[in-house]
Image (cartoon, rainbow, N blue to C red):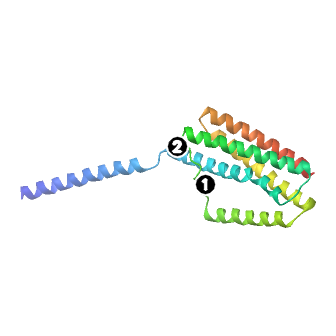
Amino acid sequence: MNEIRRAGVCGTLLACGLTVAGCATVQKVLPTAAWHQARVRNEGYSLLYQLLSQESDVGKIFIIKHANPPVAGIIKEIASACDQARKGLDLFHEKDRRLSFEMANLPEMEQKTREAIQSTVTKELLTSSGKTFEHRLLFTQAEAMNYAAHLSAVLHDQESDPLRKKFLDALAQQCTTFHDKVVELLK
């Protein structure tokens, strides 16, 4: 009988030990606040990188479309600045591989909505001409620069690296300036 009790006690102690060890393992797997902050930051950088990549190509529309010099000039200036900013992000990634640009993690409905908007805007731009084309193109750039400025500002507030903070602050200011210039051309 004592052997049965000892076996039961040993079994209970073993089970408790495994339970405690299991809880410790689970606690280690749960994300930390730092992990969550890095994930959120990388999602923001992913959105910014995607936007800058798209905007760096916007000037290519002039291969098949025409706009007056002031409109074409600001669009090309925006494309060039976005290309430079994208390259700047690439340099940050080379120095810090924890920085990721492939984590948008948008809900599926948001992704589909963005794709539908992009498809509609592309069709509208390709099928319009003259002032209508210019206004539509400028409007898309006003929206993009407003979004880029705010995204950069929010990322700036999340960022701890001083060089990246400075970069994001300058980018937010530059995008705000572009936004204002585009709005002036829309008037």
Please state if 73 lies on the left or on the right of 2 as rendered. Answer: right
At 70% from the left edge and 49% from the top edge, which residue is drawn?
52
Q: Measure how far apart labels 1 and 2 are at the Cα level.
A: 15 Å
Amino acid marked by disc 2: Arg
Q: What label does residue 98 carry, if any?
A: 2
At 63% from the left edge and 48% from the top edge, which residue is drawn?
44
At 34% from the left edge and 51% from the top edge, which residue is drawn?
23
In the rendered image, residue 63, in percent from the top left (x then y), is placed at: 81, 57
Q: As rendered, which of 143 and 118 lies closer to the eye?
A: 118
* Residue 118, placed above or below residue 20: below
In the rendered image, residue 6, in percent from the top left (x then y), is placed at: 11, 54
Q: Point out the tag, 1 or 2, that comes first from the N-terminus.
A: 2
In the rendered image, residue 110, in percent from the top left (x then y), is placed at: 66, 62
Residue 155 occupies quadrant? top right
Residue under circle 1?
A: 104
Amino acid marked by disc 1: Ala
Secondary structure of residue under mark 2:
loop
